Each structure stands twice: as C-alpha cells, then as structure tokens.
C-alpha cells in the first residue's frame, strides 16, 4: 500500500495579496499538498504584520514550509525574517525560486500580487516547492546564519 505522506504547508496574505493567494491555494490542492490558509479571507484592508508573524512561527514550530503574499512581498518578508529560524525570500522569477531553495534553504516564499501576474506566480510556486536544498557548502553558510541568530537572541 502507498503510504506516501502528504506535504503540509501554511499560507497567508494581506488584502493586497488575497486574490493571488486564492489561486495558489487551488494550485497546492491540485498538487495534493495539505494547505492551511490563515487569511486574509477578503480584500478588506488589513495589516500584513500579524499574518506574517503567525505563518513564520508555525513554519518554525512545525518544521513546514510557508507562502506569504502581499502587494510587493516585501513587508511580509521583513516581518517573517524577524522570527528566529525563518529564511523568507521575495521571489519574482523562476531562476531565483530554484536558487533560493537550493542555496538558501528558504522556508517561506514571499511574492507580490502587484508585481507579477498569476501565471508566473504559479510557476514560481511549483519550482520553489519541487526544488530541494543542495546542502554541502550551502549548509555551512546557513549554519553561519543560525549561529548569528543564537548569539543575538
Ligand atoms: C498594502 O498597501 C501594501 O503596502 C502591502 O501589501 C505590502 O506590499 C507591503 O509590503
């Protein structure tokens, strides 16, 4: 019997990222990924900070991956990267999507709905999910970041 475990992810947005988030949720379901959507649930104006904090803390505590969408992806990434253990990357091209998984072992993907079209955003999402961390020399570089985090907090 195939006991393949479903990959689990968490996703959030503010009002400016709501429409793209809905499309990404559909994609993840099509890919048979278990996805938890923590809002926003409409285009009513909201603050990206609390959503980024919630997703980032869950990513660290549950050792899963997350996706955050706002107008630019930038506010989300700034907030998410405050959480120890988070490597959130703003990505708007497929080359960087692959590179940030392979080299940075990024655990949160941030994108801006006002920056790119949904077709590209879905391709970026697929590439980011499919790409594994290369480890090796990159693991040493990530360890430097971890050491820094443990010294300052
Ligand atoms: C909302 O207007 C916008 O500032 C926000 O979605 C995001 O782009 C912030 O970085």
Image: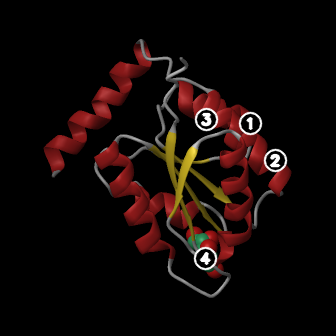
Residue 94 badge:
1
Between the residue at mark 4 and the residue at mark 1, the CA separation in whole angstroms equals 27 Å
Residue 41 badge:
4
Q: How is the image coloured?
A: secondary structure
Q: Quadrant of residue 50?
A: bottom left
The 10 Å Cα crowd at callout 4, few under 14, some 14 to 19, many 20 or more, is some
- On the picture, is 149 further left or further right than 136? left
Front disc: 1 or 3: 3
Front disc: 2 or 3: 3
Between the residue at mark 1 and the residue at mark 3, the CA separation in whole angstroms equals 11 Å
Give percent across and percent down for residue 119.
Answer: 85, 50
Between the residue at mark 4 and the residue at mark 3, the CA separation in whole angstroms equals 23 Å
Residue 120 badge:
2
Given residues 32 and 56, the one toward you in this image is: 32
Q: Earlier in the sequence, mark 4 or mark 3?
A: 4
Q: Earlier in the sequence, mark 1 or mark 2?
A: 1
- On the picture, is 23 further left or further right than 69? right
Q: Quadrant of residue 12?
A: bottom right
Q: Residue at x 69, y 33 (%)?
A: 127
Height in image: 69 above or below 92? below
Q: Earlier in the sequence, mark 2 or mark 3?
A: 2
Give percent across and percent down for residue 152.
Answer: 17, 49
Q: Residue at x 65, y 64 (%)?
A: 72
Q: Residue at x 47, y 31 (%)?
A: 105
Front disc: 4 or 1: 4
């Amino acid at each position: 019997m195939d006991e393949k475990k479903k990959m689990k992810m968490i996703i959030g947005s503010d009002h400016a990222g709501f429409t793209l988030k809905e499309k990404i949720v559909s994609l993840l379901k099509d890919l048979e990924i278990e996805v938890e959507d923590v809002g926003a649930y409409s285009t009513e104006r909201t603050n990206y900070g609390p959503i980024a904090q919630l997703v980032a803390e869950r990513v660290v505590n549950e050792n899963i991956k997350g996706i955050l969408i706002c107008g630019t992806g930038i506010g989300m990434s700034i907030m998410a990267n405050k959480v120890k253990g988070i490597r959130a990357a703003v990505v708007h091209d497929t080359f960087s999507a692959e590179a940030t998984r392979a080299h940075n072992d990024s655990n949160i993907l941030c994108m801006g709905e006002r920056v790119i079209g949904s077709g590209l955003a879905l391709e970026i999402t697929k590439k980011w999910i499919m790409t594994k961390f290369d480890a090796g020399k990159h693991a040493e570089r990530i360890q430097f970041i971890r050491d820094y985090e443990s010294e300052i907090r």
